Image (cartoon, rainbow, N blue to C red):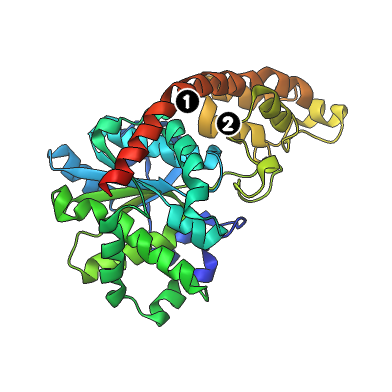
């Protein structure tokens, strides 16, 4: 199976999730594992697959050091797709005491988006402030910029001897070499927790959207050849964009919800989000809406409603026909707006801390 099936740099792609297990060797997050995690995203089938999560949990339960690794490309503000990964990262830190490794992928922002390193600094500060406001404990975290973390760059260079053009092409397809090297740099990111400066070999879990699996497979191949512990991963489903298309992407701000959107802008976007409602009021009353198409329900399911009973009430409002689309949106959108207002207040308080953390990281890099 070639990498053209999964493109980590594509802004839009869809997946047949049922085929991923057989084609790419992922394991399912089954009911037993979801119960063990006791986590909203696992319970609702959003975190649906993994690699070696069971082994990671075994080590965590035994009191062995474990790590969770993620990052963000500082090309724009945090949006809901970014938040999804951050929620998982913070969950593993809080529940299992895992040390967080968080990369500000400014080199990838240059390779993929053409953004100079100095252009992305303020965005990186903003992104990190979002992460802190979401609950990251910086006291048990190593936050860094790729361009400043010499160990990552050294590891990427050393690991390059394990990669061949045919191997890179098989995983990623034909690419500019800047993207190939960005992929090698991500291997350095993913394996950084096993550097001797951080205690050496340990289990690492990397929460990602399923579209990022090529990077995980590449890192696992390199780790095997370097006789390191292969990193594990958790995979979440890809959120639809607000217009109902395949993927919520930073590249289209009108079809994504940013955590920095004002309540007025957020309300407008959600009111205009693709709906599962029928074409006419009569059809809606008679047939009820299609919950599988309703983007607002997906947004709430993934992010803003923790209580399952409340989410079920929202589902009934759409599918029973007892509410028209406008009424339905007016009732449920305030849950998202209240969350955004609270988050933005916390983020404002975290901005000085975020700036200080990155300035310290630059000095120590």
Q: Dot 2 lies on which element?
A: loop
Q: Dot 1 lies on which element?
A: helix
Pick the residue in front: 22 or 217: 217
Measured Cα–Cα span from mark 2 to mark 1:
9 Å
Residue occupied by mark 2 = 260
Q: Is residue 32 above or below residue 196?
A: above
Mark 2 residue crowding within 10 angstroms, few (<14) / some (14–19) / many (20+): some
Q: Does residue 346 appear anywhere in the picture?
A: yes
Residue occupied by mark 1 = 347
* 47 lies left or right of 38: right
Residue 43: % across, % down: 42, 34
Residue 327: name its quadrant: top right
Q: Residue at x 13, y 49 (%)?
A: 199
Pick the residue in front: 100 or 97: 100
Q: Is residue 130 above or below residue 224?
A: above
* 157 lies left or right of 210: left
Q: Does residue 237 appear anywhere in the picture?
A: no
Mark 2 and mark 1 residues within 8 Å of each other at the beta carbon? yes
């Amino acid at each position: 199976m070639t990498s053209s099936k999964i493109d980590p740099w594509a802004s839009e792609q869809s997946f047949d999730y049922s085929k991923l297990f057989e084609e790419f060797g992922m394991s399912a997050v089954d009911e037993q594992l979801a119960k063990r995690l006791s986590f909203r995203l696992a319970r609702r089938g959003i975190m649906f697959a993994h690699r070696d999560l069971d082994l990671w949990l075994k080590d965590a339960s035994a009191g062995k050091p474990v790590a969770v690794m993620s990052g963000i490309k500082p090309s724009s503000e945090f949006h809901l797709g970014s938040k999804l990964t951050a929620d998982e990262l913070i969950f593993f830190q809080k529940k299992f005491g895992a040390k967080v490794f968080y990369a500000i992928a400014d080199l990838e922002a240059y390779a993929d988006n053409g953004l100079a390193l100095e252009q992305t600094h303020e965005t990186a500060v903003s992104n990190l402030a979002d992460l802190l406001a979401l609950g990251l404990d910086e006291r048990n975290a190593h936050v860094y910029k790729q361009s400043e973390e010499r160990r990552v760059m050294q590891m990427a260079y050393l690991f390059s001897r394990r990669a061949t053009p045919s191997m890179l092409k098989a995983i990623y397809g034909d690419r500019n070499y800047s993207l190939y090297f960005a992929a090698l740099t991500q291997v350095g990111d993913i394996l950084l927790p096993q550097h001797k400066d951080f205690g050496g070999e340990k289990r690492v879990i990397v929460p990602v959207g399923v579209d990022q699996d090529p990077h995980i497979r590449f890192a696992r191949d390199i780790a095997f050849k370097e006789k390191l512990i292969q990193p594990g991963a958790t995979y979440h489903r890809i959120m639809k964009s607000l217009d109902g298309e395949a993927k919520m992407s930073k590249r289209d701000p009108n079809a994504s919800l940013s955590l920095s959107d004002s309540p007025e802008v957020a309300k407008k976007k959600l009111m205009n989000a693709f709906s599962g409602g029928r074409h006419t009021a009569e059809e809606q009353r008679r047939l009820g809406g299609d919950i599988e198409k309703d983007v607002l329900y997906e947004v709430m399911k993934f992010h803003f409603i923790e209580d399952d009973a409340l989410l079920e009430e929202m589902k009934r409002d759409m599918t029973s026909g007892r509410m028209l689309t406008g009424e339905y949106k007016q009732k449920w959108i305030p849950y998202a707006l209240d969350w955004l207002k609270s988050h933005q207040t916390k983020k404002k308080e975290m901005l000085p801390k975020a700036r200080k953390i990155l300035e310290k990281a630059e000095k120590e890099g």
